[in-house]
Amino acid sequence: METDSGRMESSVWLGSKRHRALLSGWRFSWTELDKKNRDKNTISVPVSEVIAVMEGQVEIQPQKKVKDTDRDFTVFYVKRSNTSGGKAPLWSLGRSQFCCPSRDLRDQWVTQLRIALKTHCPSRPHRLLVFINPYGGKKKGKQIYHSTVAPLFELAGISSHVVVTERANQARDHILKKDLTGFDGVVCVGGDGMFSELLHGVIGRTQQEAGVSEHDPCVMLQPCDLHIGIIPAGSTDCVCFATVGVNDPVTSALHIIIGDSQPLDVCSVHHHSTLVRYSVSLVGYGFYGDVLAESERRRWMGPLRYDYSGFLVYLCNRSYQGIVQYLPADSQITSPRDNSRCLSGCKVCSESTERLFPRSESCSSLYSRQLSQYSIDSEGEWLSVEGSFRCVSLTCMSSSCPRSPKGLSPSAHLADGTGDLILVRNTNPLGFLTYLHRHTNTQDQFDLPFVEVHRVKAVRFSFPPNEEDDEDEPKESRNITAGIPGDPGTLSEGNVESGRLGSQQHLAEKPREQGMKEKGRKKRDYLCGLCSSKRSPTSVWNCDGEILPYSEILCRVHGQLVRLFARGIEEDTVSRKYHEGSRNCQGRCILHN
Ligand SMILES: CCCCCCCCCCCCC/C=C/[C@@H](O)[C@H](COP(=O)(O)O)NC(=O)CCCCCCCCCCCCCCC
Ligand SMILES: Nc1ncnc2c1ncn2[C@@H]1O[C@H](COP(=O)(O)OP(=O)(O)O)[C@@H](O)[C@H]1O
Ligand SMILES: [Ca+2]
């Protein structure tokens, strides 16, 4: 046996096989020895991926069982499944029970491993605030949390305060208003809508505390420290899929436990000088807006509502007039058509950190400088495109999801401070189907004559002037469907089937005097008239699954505004092993387990 600071090595037994266990700096490994003491297989785990070290022989599945023997200790760690073909590995809980020659040695192993955990994993959460949406996706949120996630948190020594929501926006309001002292992060068990509640709560709270006005599109928002975790239990679960690579509650729980940190770009959506919402995945007009509007009254169908509504909307074959103005990002750095992929440890994103938050200036002076000098019109030249569009989509990330594993914009980056603007001009039904279908295969969806894509920092959408004259009311108030902000009818639990619910009270709301009756009429008219011969000339905006109450909007991308308990998409196991021989692995990228 050998120990010195941070290093320990000894003989141990795993079942009937003798091994040499070695803790060296940030790695813990054990190697099987044959009868002649020659090395056979080695399993090596970075300390940052050790979940817990327990005395005795411990099991947690199917139930927790501890056999408190003198010479044993159990190590739980992250284990990856073998995957190929670009699929990110699933994580599961690995467990190895070691038997030492003496109790003393066992105690030393437990102590040293726990010290290593403290030293190498300073940013693990100890206390979490968890919100479960019992109605999200297939309505399995509570079951997923209690049977799969809670036992893992308990094993890792994380204490959690759980709130099962009783109404929409409860999680957001809780984060905005309640005392959060002692919490290292907030977690949602639900879908993208539930994530969006946490996003609005965390950003809103951070700006309140920093005294920053969210409504001003030119303001430099304060980056948020409180991390957000997502346990996927919704319908699309795009944010989880695009930041982890799989929708799996165990994988996400393990990322939360080890305190992974993934910065994320966020888009703020404004109407005149009022903040309407924030978005991380899709701000989409036309097809995706119509699909969402259609799908709201079919919530009872669960996740399938999107496919069914998508099919109906596709048959409607609609396109919409609009003017799209955008502020291009620096095209020298990256492009949405450069065939790159934003993977875990992405170089483009980490280099963007330096650009977005230059180290040479102290935080406070930088902040006040940007506050006073930033102007959305001084950031470069705006370009303009006018026409008839099947859809206009802006996404800050790839927006991949199980339905579309490469997403709306496969080469978009999670944290580069830019978004991708996709303009799909009017085309024939077969052309549009080809475009949609390419989201599901390896063909390039941007390589079509009616599609263009731009990497941008900001986008404005408005209508051509003559459009305004066709109708008897301004467009701003025409596009009302489900999920009307401030609509009390949508806030109750009993109403969950009727749709997405309410928007932040501190954000832009339509004047209340418009009244429920009018809103109800417009909602009906819009939905019934969707495919009718007297077509509405406008669509609605889908903002991460929420319908916006305005059509003319300004969107601005805020680089790395929030942080998730995630690390980006890992390469599949086969590619990783292939690359391992040729690169000098650092930290968590080496995995033999
Ligand atoms: C022919 C197959 C076409 C497949 C097209 C797949 C495109 C997928 C793009 C996905 C972008 C996802 C962006 C994320 C949005 C979410 O934030 C948001 C909220 O999620 P939540 O309910 O979990 O809270 N989700 C959504 O707004 C849903 C948008 C989903 C659109 C899917 C549309 C499916 C269309 C199927 C068309 C079928 C045409 C068939 C013609 C014969
Ligand atoms: N208890 C509740 N009752 C009604 N609506 C809720 C409740 N909790 C959350 N919500 C709202 O439900 C919407 C959908 O939730 P989400 O978890 O995203 O599921 P899905 O992915 O199926 O849409 C969210 O916009 C959220 O604000
Ligand atoms: Ca981005």
Image: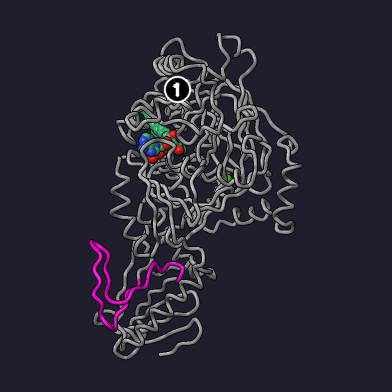
**Percent position (x, y) of residue 149?**
34, 55
Comparing 197 with 235, the one in front is 197
Tell me the residue that label 1 is attached to: 481
Nearer the observer, 317 or 295: 295
The picture places residue 94, in percent across and down from the top left corner, at 33, 67
Specify few, some or many for label 1: CA neighbours under 10 Å numbering under 14, 14-19, or 20 or more. Answer: many
Q: Quadrant of residue 423?
A: top right
Residue drawn at 43 percent across, 18 percent down: 523
Indicate if the residue with disc 1 has its beta carbon within 8 Å of ligand 1.
no
Query: What amino acid type is highlighted by mark number 1?
Result: Thr
In the image, 532 versus 333, the foreground residue is 532
Can residue 416 be seen at all in this image of the molecule? no
Residue 162 in sight: yes
Residue depicted at 43% across the width and 75% down the height: 114
Locate the N terminus and report the quarter of the image it occupies. bottom left
Q: Quadrant of residue 191?
A: top left
Residue 535 to residue 62: above or below: above
**Relative to 281, residue 87 above or below:** below
Q: Residue at x 44, y 66 (%)?
A: 577
48 is within the stretch colored magenta: yes
On screen, residue 510 versus residue 19, left or right, reads: right
In terms of depth relative to the viewer, which is nearer, 411 or 123?
123
Question: How many numbered circles does the render carry?
Answer: 1
Which residues fall within the magenta stretch? Answer: 47-75
Secondary structure beneath disc 1? loop
Residue 344, image x, y percentages: 51, 57
Name the quarter where the C terminus is drawn. Answer: bottom left
Q: Per the image, is 243 magenta?
A: no
Residue 17 in the image, given as x and y percentages of width and height: 27, 82
Image vertical order of residue 78 relative to residue 540, above or below:
below
Find ligand 1 in the image and state its quadrant: top left
